[in-house]
Amino acid sequence: MKALVTGGSGFIGSTLIDALTKRGITVDVLMRKTSSDKNLRGLQYHRVEGDISDFASLKKAVEGADVIFHLAGVIAAKNRSEYFLFNAMGTENLARAAAEANAEGKAKVARFVYVSTLAAGGPSPGTNPRTERDPDGPVSAYGQSKKAGEDGLLKYRSSFLPLMLRAPIVYGPKDSATLILIKSAAKRLVPKLPARSADGEKHYSVVHASDLVEALVTLGTADAKKFENGDVFYVSSGEDITSSQLIASMAESLGVRTFSVPIPRPVLHAISTLGSWYGRVSGKSTVINRDKLNELLPDYWTCSNSKLMTKTDWRPRVRLEEGMREAIGWYKKNGWIG
């Protein structure tokens, strides 16, 4: 079997490539000329130069592939158009390239596994974990663009089996996103977002990178009869993690005592407005802005992994405490934190 992986130079992609090659699967990795291979050193793969915005390069990249794992995309962008350019149009470009190459006899893509996000579904309905039966309601440009990517992929469902895996917070070694919060915990001061839940907490689903990758491999290799054409799955550790528990797991692994700094709702609104203004003036993406505020305000971002566990043999193996110890140990060993 031969797999094409996009977004392979990221921390999830590199973990996926390692898992695939250990199963004897040949891996092509779509990479831009400027993409770093730092995370891929020591792995067995074939580099294919191209870009998800360059259709001709995609037609060439899909040749010979049996399955596509599409991880490429952006989680932060300068504006709404940039989100849709990469997450929606890029996904549809790759799907169309695979479908056309199949029709021309230049490819034999049978399955297309798309790494989507819980944000494509939206916050939890009430206090219950979101399931695949719940209507989608993305609240941010990021979530809406990933949902548009799913919809674009489904246009080509007659050519191959499209499967979508929606992930919540992903963490693990080499992850730079959660590292920001871990560094705050290391300094003993962490921001606490305002919450209106009964317990005064934000609630999140999380998944360790290794568990996410095992779910991807399962979707890419399991008997096709297990799936419906266009199946969507949520993936998580199965834990309901409060914001306090998340910080506590970091503090314990770091060996420090942390102090929470509450951020009042009006202050959060002001910061997001300032972030949007700075983004417009500088032309740069910002961590917090008016659009991201729509993701920060809901109290529940949880999802159920029941459908994935029912249809496949996949099971989560890494709980938060264990996974955070591993991640922070890796950060320390590699000099990412002191």
Image (cartoon, grey):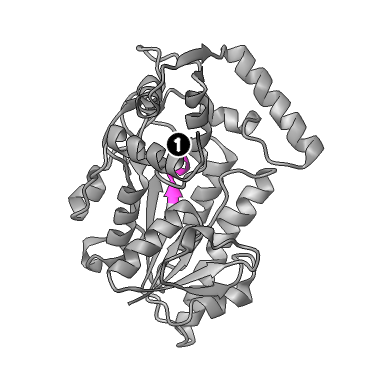
Residue furthest to the bottom in view is 105
Name the residue tied to disc 1.
122
Image position of 289 with respect to 82: above or below: above
Left or right of residue 303: residue 65: right
Q: Nearer the viewer, residue 262 or 180?
A: 180
Image position of 154 with respect to 240: above or below: below
Magenta region: 116-122
In percent of width and height, residue 77 lies at 65, 45
Which quarter of the rendering shows the N terminus? bottom left
In percent of width and height, residue 196 lies at 44, 13
Secondary element at tag 1: loop
Image position of 16 with respect to 171: above or below: below
Magenta segment includes 115: no
Magenta segment includes 120: yes
Which image quadrant is residue 134 in? top left
Residue at image coords 43%, 53%: 12
Left or right of residue 134: residue 185: right
In percent of width and height, residue 294 lies at 56, 29
Count the numbered circles shown. 1
Dot 1 alpha-carbon crowd within 10 angstroms: few under 14, some 14 to 19, many 20 or more: many
Which image quadrant is residue 18 in? bottom left
In percent of width and height, residue 90 lies at 58, 61
Residue at image coords 33%, 66%: 20
* Residue 85 in view (yes/no): yes
Residue at image coords 24%, 65%: 222
Q: Nearer the viewer, residue 9 or 131?
A: 9
* Residue 135 in view (yes/no): no
User: What's under tag 1, amino acid-wise?
Assistant: Gly
